[in-house]
Image (cartoon, rainbow, N blue to C red):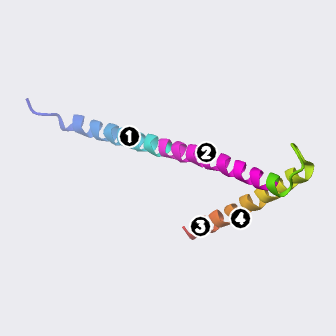
Amino acid sequence: MAENPNQEKKTDPLMQEFHETKNAIKENLLTLVVAAFTLVAALAWNDAVQSLVKTIFPQGNGGIISKFVYAIIATIIVAVISLRLRKIAAKK
């Protein structure tokens, strides 16, 4: 029994869509895993910077000056990283 050439044409777009969906799922999973590791790293840096500020400004728990210093340091770090990422994205 010979295969119908029309059947093969119908299968190709279906298989192509399947592979595209499969690749999209892989890309999304990779993005989620990288985001999870980024969150872990950010939390580690958060703890490190808080400890540094508390060491430099030992005013007990919840000192207002140490909180402002921490906020300023965090803002500077985020701003520098954001600017560098924009430059990298602009090159592409």
Marker disc for residue 50: none
Q: Label 3 to label 2, Cα distance in Å?
A: 23 Å
Residue ID for mark 2: 40
The amino acid on which the numbered mark 2 sits, given as a three-letter code, is Val
Provide residue 66's location: percent of width, then percent of height. Answer: 86, 52
Q: Quadrant of the N terminus?
A: top left
Q: Label 1 to label 4, Cα distance in Å?
A: 41 Å
Label pair 3/4, CB-CB below 8 angstroms? no
Q: Label 2 to label 4, Cα distance in Å?
A: 20 Å
Residue beneath the point at 61% across and 49% down: 41
Label pair 1/2, CB-CB below 8 angstroms? no
Residue ID for mark 3: 88
Foreground label between 1 and 2: 2
Provide residue 21's location: percent of width, then percent of height. Answer: 42, 40
Query: Quick one: SS at disc 4?
Result: helix
Residue beneath the point at 36% across and 42% down: 19
| In-front residue for pair 57/4 | 57
Residue ID for mark 1: 17
Label whose residue precedes the other's in the sequence (1 or 3)? 1
> How busy is the neighbourhood of tag 3: few (under 14 within 10 Å), some, or many (20 plus)?
few
The main secondary structure of the magenta stretch is helix
Foreground label between 2 and 4: 2
Label whose residue precedes the other's in the sequence (3 or 2)? 2
- Chain part drawn in magenta: 29-53
Provide residue 86's location: percent of width, then percent of height. Answer: 65, 64
> How busy is the neighbourhood of tag 2: few (under 14 within 10 Å), some, or many (20 plus)?
few
Query: Quick one: SS at disc 2?
Result: helix
